[in-house]
Every structure is written in structure tokens, then in C-alpha cells.
Image (cartoon, rainbow, N blue to C red):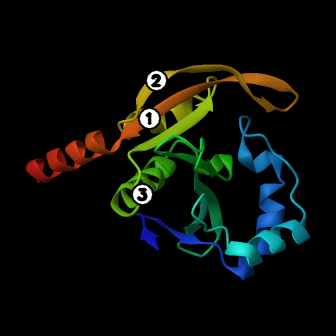
């Protein structure tokens, strides 16, 4: 478990599956930028039985309120087989939580976790060019903007350009060293 200021991140448990079917299929909770696809309960349960959404190539964490309510999700996955990289994705459920720094804090916990435990040199974030909030998360965490992938994703019936950000292990380590020096 990764502890935040008003939430914690943990792996998915079997008791979460029914609620995840509801949350992952509710377009109103997820905002305007992620492709939202309905998820069947049987598919979700089958995938959970396979590896609990925690494997070498894909890991999902739930963002839980102090009352054990699912308020978001973060995932790490291998975007390209030949890159020494993982990609970080995230969604904060419910507009009333947006703009409070919660996802920046949660994503920062995951970045630290990845670079502290995984043998990977690069962590990437991709987001719709219109999703300024998601781009700000990457920027606040020290990711470098590397470019725009044109019409790279299909969401809600149209193709969208995507920002690509990356954080290299050495840059992360340097930022951590600077934090220690300040404290």
C-alpha cells in the first residue's frame, strides 16, 4: 500500500470487482479524454483470477479514500516491447475531486514506487492535447514534453492528438537528491 495525505493506493481485491464494473463503465465519472468502454463483470473476474491486475507488463492500483471508497485508478504498463520504459496512466473519478492536487500526489507516489522497485530507465505519460489538467500533472512531476503524436487515439468517435512526456531515472534520482539537500 502507498499512503497519500488523504487517500491510499492499493492493489485490486476480489471484493472491488462489482464496483469496478460500475465505475469503469460510467462515462460521467471519467471525464472527457479517456476512451470509455463498458467492461463485463465476467471479463473483469476472469482477468482478476488470471493475475489480479498485477503482472510484469501491467499493474493497476486503486486510489481509495480514507472511507475505503474507490476514487481513482492508476496503471503502469509496457507501451512498446523494445523500449526500456513503462507508461503511467491515471483517472480520478468524480469531478468534485478534480483540481485539488490528489492525482498529482498519487502519480508522484507511483513514480517513486516504479523507480524504486522496477528495472526501468524511463517512465512515460501520454495525454490528450486538450487535457490540460493531465499535462500539468506530468509537468509538476518533472516529466519532459517530448512531442505530440498526431491522431494517436480514438475516443468518443474521433481521433485525438496526444502529448508525450517522459521522466528518465537519472532525472528522477537527481530531483530526489535535491529534495534531500533542501531538507
52 sits left or right of 17 in the view: left
- Residue bearing the label numbered 1: 166
Q: What element carries label 2?
A: strand
Mark 1 vs mark 3, CA separation in Å = 13 Å
Mark 2 vs mark 1, CA separation in Å = 7 Å
Nearer-N-terminus badge (1/3): 3
**Cβ–Cβ below 8 Å for labels 3 and 2?**
no
Q: Tell which of 127 and 121 is nearer to you.
A: 121
Q: Is mark 1 on a helix, strand or loop?
A: strand
User: Residue 116 in the image: x percent, y percent?
Assistant: 34, 61
Q: How crowded is mark 1: few (under 14 residues within 10 Å), some or many (20 or more)?
A: many
Residue at position x 67%, y 74% in the image: 52
43 sits left or right of 86 in the view: right
Residue at position x 78%, y 56% in the image: 24
Using the image, determine if residue 32 lies above or below residue 87: above
- Residue bearing the label numbered 3: 114
Q: How crowded is mark 3: few (under 14 residues within 10 Å), some or many (20 or more)?
A: some
Q: Residue furthest front?
A: 82
Q: Quadrant of the C terminus?
A: bottom left
Query: What numbered label is drawn on residue 146?
Result: 2
Q: Tell which of 56 and 62 is nearer to you.
A: 56
Q: Specify the quadrant of the image occupied by residue 69.
A: bottom right
Amino acid at each position: 500500500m502507498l499512503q497519500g495525505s488523504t487517500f491510499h493506493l492499493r492493489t485490486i481485491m476480489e471484493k472491488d470487482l462489482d464496483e469496478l464494473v460500475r465505475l469503469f463503465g460510467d462515462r460521467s465519472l471519467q471525464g472527457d479524454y479517456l476512451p470509455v468502454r463498458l467492461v463485463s463483470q465476467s471479463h473483469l473476474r476472469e482477468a482478476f483470477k488470471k493475475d489480479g491486475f498485477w503482472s510484469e507488463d501491467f499493474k493497476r492500483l486503486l486510489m481509495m479514500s480514507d472511507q475505503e471508497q474507490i476514487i481513482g485508478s492508476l496503471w503502469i504498463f509496457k507501451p512498446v516491447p523494445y523500449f526500456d520504459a513503462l507508461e503511467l496512466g491515471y483517472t480520478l473519478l468524480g469531478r468534485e475531486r478534480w483540481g485539488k492536487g490528489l492525482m498529482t500526489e498519487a502519480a508522484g507516489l507511483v513514480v517513486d514506487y516504479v523507480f524504486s522497485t522496477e528495472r526501468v530507465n524511463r517512465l512515460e505519460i501520454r495525454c490528450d492535447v486538450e487535457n490540460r489538467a493531465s499535462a500539468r500533472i506530468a509537468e509538476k512531476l518533472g516529466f519532459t514534453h517530448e512531442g505530440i503524436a498526431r491522431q494517436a487515439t480514438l475516443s468518443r468517435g474521433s481521433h485525438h492528438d496526444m502529448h508525450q512526456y517522459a521522466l528518465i531515472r537519472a532525472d528522477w534520482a537527481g530531483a530526489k537528491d535535491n529534495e534531500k539537500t533542501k531538507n
